[in-house]
Image (cartoon, rainbow, N blue to C red):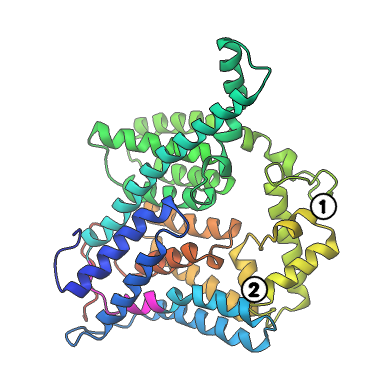
Amino acid sequence: MFYKEDHWVVMTFWNSLYIAFFLLPLGINLPTPFFIVSIVFGIGMMFRPQNKFVLDKSVLLFPLYFILMSFSLIYTDNLFDGLSLLQRSLSLLLFPIIFLFVKEDAATVKRLFDFLLVGLIVSFFINVFNATNNLLWYVLDQQETTGLLSFLEKISNERYRFFSGSEFSKLVNSNYVSIYILLVLSYYLKNRLESSGQVIVLVILFLYLFILASIAAYLILAIMSILLIFDIADKGKKYIMLIVFLMGAILFLNNPRVSHFYYRIKDFCKTVDYKSESTASEKSKLLAWDASIKLIKKAPVLGYGVGDANEALMAEYNELNYRLNHQNKYNSHNQFLQTYLQTGIMGFCILVAIFVLLAMRMKRSRNEFSVFLIFFISLLFESMLVRFNGIVFFSIVIPLLLKKRSILSSRIIRNLPK
């Protein structure tokens, strides 16, 4: 197996996590059984007699967040949806507590990113194959296509239909895959590229990110690049990298999904041309934020409960005539707003406190701070804590990042008493 040291319970815990991280970009439900296995064996690790408990107060914010979600069931009418979300959120309670008992080192945690990287590469080629196949069949089905030149021209004209955003990333939501790519990049870009294989992998990841065309991911990537450039001591290299950054920015901004961004969000309250998900994704997010803020003003203290928050949002969409949002049952598309709707001001403050502490821990270097930005900006554009994959990823990586010795460093991490 991949983790061979220590007790078999510990070995099963880490190996299950490795497999789950590999499967994260390959399917929504594929990693779930392995995360469950790791939770079960992680609980077993807590009761090993030789294990020592080392308190880290920042980690306790996660169980507190879960407890507050449970408390909101008291004023939730839709208990079924509330209990379902609470069940998916159990990892917020369990993984942070498990990591108080777990002894891990930088090499062990690095393997998590290694397996995630392999999963991303595999998912990229699967998506390329599927998109190419769909594009070819689509062009072949067009009766007006005659001759080789006409065929190639049609492929060129229609390629963005299948090689862009959610149409390309059929395995997992494109925004989640973008987050995985950015985290892998932030972890590996701190080291020098020492082989052609590493350069090829880096090119594939940037190409993958370009095709996914996530506005939030582009924004994060731009900030990460600027932080890395200003971290270069040599002025000559800094100017060269700045030129490369500007050329890359021009390339990314020429992606059709990005170049049309302004037109998709212009006059966002006018919903006459608000017809399809593919052409109104950014506008739908702005409308979701607008409806969420209006709802928060109506219940600023307790919110609506974990079971009723989405129902209240659907009613608000209907009242505001945001038809596409109502039809697709969009959530807030912002975890901070989503948390406020679910648990009120207390839950919102706990979530903000987690990121304040994370920012304080990640300020040790620009590379580490870029990891904070990845999560913070991602949660501004996505309600990550409503899907199991997002919840479990958040509940594993963030507690590890909150360690006094970051998993991004090369130093050994130990949960041992001083």
Label 2: which secondary element: helix
State the image coordinates of residue 185 (x, y, percent, origin top left).
38, 46
Q: Residue at x 76, y 53 (%)?
A: 324
Q: Is residue 283 left or right of residue 9?
A: right
State the image coordinates of residue 251 (x, y, percent, origin top left).
53, 29
Magenta segment = 94-104
Q: Nearer the viewer, residue 20 or 338?
A: 20
Q: Is residue 139 above or below residue 328?
A: above
Which mark, by number, is residue 269?
Answer: 1
Q: Residue at x 58, y 16 (%)?
A: 151
User: Looking at the image, can residue 397 be seen?
Assistant: yes
Residue at which label 2 appears: 340
Q: Is residue 257 left or right of residue 5?
A: right
Q: Quadrant of the C terminus?
A: bottom left
Q: CA distance from mark 2 to mark 1?
A: 23 Å
Tell me which amino acid carries mark 2. Tyr
Q: Residue at x 14, y 71 (%)?
A: 6
Which mark, by number, is residue 401?
Answer: none
Tell me which amino acid carries mark 1. Cys
State the image coordinates of residue 186 (x, y, percent, origin top left).
38, 49
Task: Give the class, few, some or many, for how many residues have Cα within 10 Å of label 1's Cα (few <14, many ≥20).
Answer: some
Q: Nearer the viewer, residue 97 or 279?
A: 279
Rendered image quadrant of residue 253: top right
Q: Is residue 245 left or right of residue 203?
A: right
